[in-house]
Image (spheres, rainbow, N blue to C red):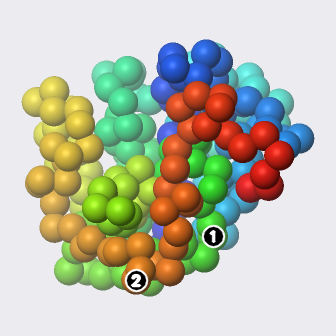
Amino acid sequence: MDVVNVMLAGGASRRFGEPKASYMYQGKPLYEHVKKQLLKRQTVIISHPSLLTFFKERGERDVWLDDEQVRGYGPLAGMYTAMQNKEAAWYLVTACDMPFIRRETAEALSSYCSEHVDAIIPLVQGRLQPLFALYHHRCLPAIDACLKENQLAMKDLIQKLKVRIVSEEELNATPNEFRNINKRNDLPENGMI
């Protein structure tokens, strides 16, 4: 299956107080905890401008800023940039602040890819998880429309797509996997990821 991992690391990290992607946790940057658990495919990182040098120094080759016309428009801008610049059928989109995800969950999610749906999104504890989800390339026109209409919430995009919702039970996932890190105290001090 033709899939590219897309890690979104372009946010301002205001609540965290510093860029989350580069925050050192258990001996390595937070983004590396996430990247290690993605599908064994190419990973494209959509970066905040302040992190470009950091990622290059870490040996990352596929690091891009959002396209200029959509820069600062949130996750949809990152998805748009990835789909415009990297050809693939499917994109596993994830945030850089989800260090508890497991590769097994990503693989289980990818098993639901079908020509009959535009997106595969987990439902965990009654909440959709659109920032650990698969999106088909044919979502690009809907993403473009949302950006042009200034509808920047993920729910705005989801309403325009044919979505396969997959429960945490179907994925054999735990709710903890989908926890994102907004503040330093969201990270367990002594627990292993």
Q: Secondary structure at mark 1?
A: helix
Question: What residue do we see at 57% from left, 48% from top?
Answer: 98
Question: What residue do we see at 25% from left, 73% from top?
Answer: 164
Q: Amino acid at mark 2?
A: Glu
Give me the disc on residue 178: none
Seen from the viewer's position, the closer of residues 1 and 188 is: 188
Quarter of the figure with residue 24: top right
- Does 23 appear above or below 37? above
Q: CA distance from mark 2 to mark 1?
A: 15 Å
Let me know if residue 65 appears in the view: no
Frontmost of labels 2 and 1 is: 2
Label 1 crowd bin: few (<14), some (14–19), many (20+), radius 10 Å: some
Task: Write down the residue under mark 2.
Answer: 170
Give me the disc on residue 103: 1
Where is residue 21 shown, x and y percent of the image?
Answer: 66, 34
Where is residue 12 shown, x and y percent of the image?
Answer: 51, 20
